[in-house]
Image (cartoon, rainbow, N blue to C red):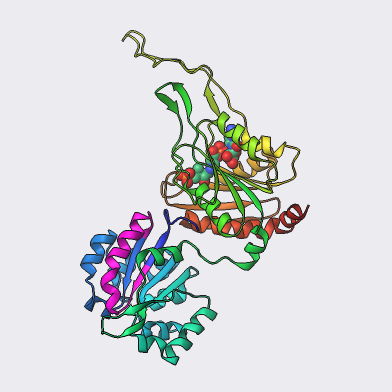
Amino acid sequence: MSSLVGQHIVLGITAGVAAYKTPALVRALRAASAEIQVVMSTNAKKFVTPTTLQAVSGQPVRDDLWDAKAEASMGHIELARWADQILIAPATANCIAALAQGQAYDLLTTICLATEAQVVVAPAMNQRMYLHAATQQNLSALERLGYQIIDPDHGEQACGEFGPGRLPDPEILIDALTTPTVDPEIASVFAGLSVMVTAGPTREAIDPVRFISNHSSGLQGLSLAEAALNAGAQVTLVAGPGVPACNPAINRVDVISATDMHTAVQNNLHGVHLFIGVAAVADYRVAKPAEQKIKKKPSDQSHLDLRLIENPDIIASVVDSDQELVVIGFAAETHDTLNHARDKRQRKGLHAIVVNDVSDARIGFNSPDNATTFITDNAEVSLPRQSKLAIANNLLQQITDNFGTELAGLKDS
Ligand code: PMT
């Protein structure tokens, strides 16, 4: 299971009685720190109001393919690209039939046809409609097309009948979103692979109450760790301060300073096949942190000198270890990004480097999105702005394409 932190979820709501349950679903998704965009079918508005959904999602609801104002801020194709996952809950028999036929007759069905994201469909309807051969055939067709179907609950229905067709509770729907399907080629490389990821900032003490650090949130590293776990890897995450909670199946080692991170990496490196250094490690630390809080100087002494010394280069120490493994670094650059990253990859002896331009406030440090270029000896692939989880999944694809054979060899050795 991966977390939903920072994930872009389009929630499609179609015209079933169970639509009245969707405000609670939106609240649960937001509690899981996902970003939600609600898209309603026209008739869904007869069961739950857009005003309620706007209030709980914090975003205006989208319901019209032809709304020029909404399209100008994020067009339907951009929305299809924005989504990490699409959940349709409740999905009516009519919506399921339309999707099975590849129809694009409204905003929701158009987005489903235009997206590369996983689409999860939660049918909810009268039990006879659900069990009808036509609906069952359409659901099978959707599965063949790669849609994920969540079976409805069984029980008493709004119409008074008993049977399958009730919308499952939000926890079940959220579980389905946290176990997305994985491309078989990526899964074949990552299954059983031992992966170590560093994430977040480090803190270098000045005195017992102050430190030097940076703006890294750890989200990009966490997303990579969770994507690798979801693809079948055994993952160790060496996490600096403030990195959000992760899946308990990840072996997480929390650290504070660069020297702590260096020790944790060295202690856990044995048997690792793939190392990905996403952490924003402080290059320098204070030579002698004060043992007591430094007091403000008298007004005639208006400066304070701090002597800084170099921290260990963690990724360079991984490259220099006796162990054979694939090593991938990140580079946070503010200018001449590609040249600096190419140079850094060569200097540090990395198999690949992933560069992000952190002068752009919409991406990189402490933002839900990123945009990167993956640089190897003979290829450079740009990944446009998208969520950090989408970047992580695309990077797994790049790692598979460029180092899949090497990693398979390391796994077998
Ligand atoms: O954490 P987020 O808010 O999600 O933001 C993500 C990010 C911007 C931090 C991430 O995408 C990123 O760019 N990480 C690398 C940041 C960085 O410090 O780059 P660098 O150019 O200083 O370091 C290059 C590489 O060497 C990195 O892989 C780094 O982990 C590693 N390094 C650096 C210094 C050091 N002493 N030891 C290291 O291992």
x and y percentages locating residue 371 in the rendered image:
50, 53
Which residue is pictured at 70% across the width and 39% down the height?
319
Q: Quadrant of residue 17?
A: bottom left
Q: Quadrant of residue 277?
A: top right
**Is residue 50 on the magenta stretch?**
no
Left or right of 90? Residue 390 is right
Which residue is pictured at 41% across the width and 50% down the height?
362
Q: Quadrant of residue 6?
A: bottom left
Q: Is residue 384 above or below residue 70?
A: above
Which residue is pictured at 62% across the width and 35% down the height?
314
- Foreground: 359 or 290? 290
x and y percentages locating residue 105 in the rendered image:
37, 83
Which residue is pictured at 45% across the width and 92% down the height?
133
Q: Is most of the magenta stretch helix, strand or loop?
A: helix
Quadrant containing ligand 1 reads top right
Left or right of 106? Residue 255 is right
From this viewpoint, is residue 332 visible? no
From this viewpoint, is residue 63 visible? yes
Left or right of 92? Residue 265 is right
For the record, the magenta segment spans 11-35
x and y percentages locating residue 369 in the rendered image:
44, 53
- Foreground: 306 or 25? 25
Q: Is residue 120 above or below residue 331?
A: below
- Number of residue marks: 0
Q: Furthest-bottom residue in view?
A: 133
Q: Is residue 303 above or below residue 1?
A: above
Q: Is residue 311 above or below residue 69?
A: above
**Is residue 19 on the magenta stretch?**
yes
Left or right of 133? Residue 326 is right
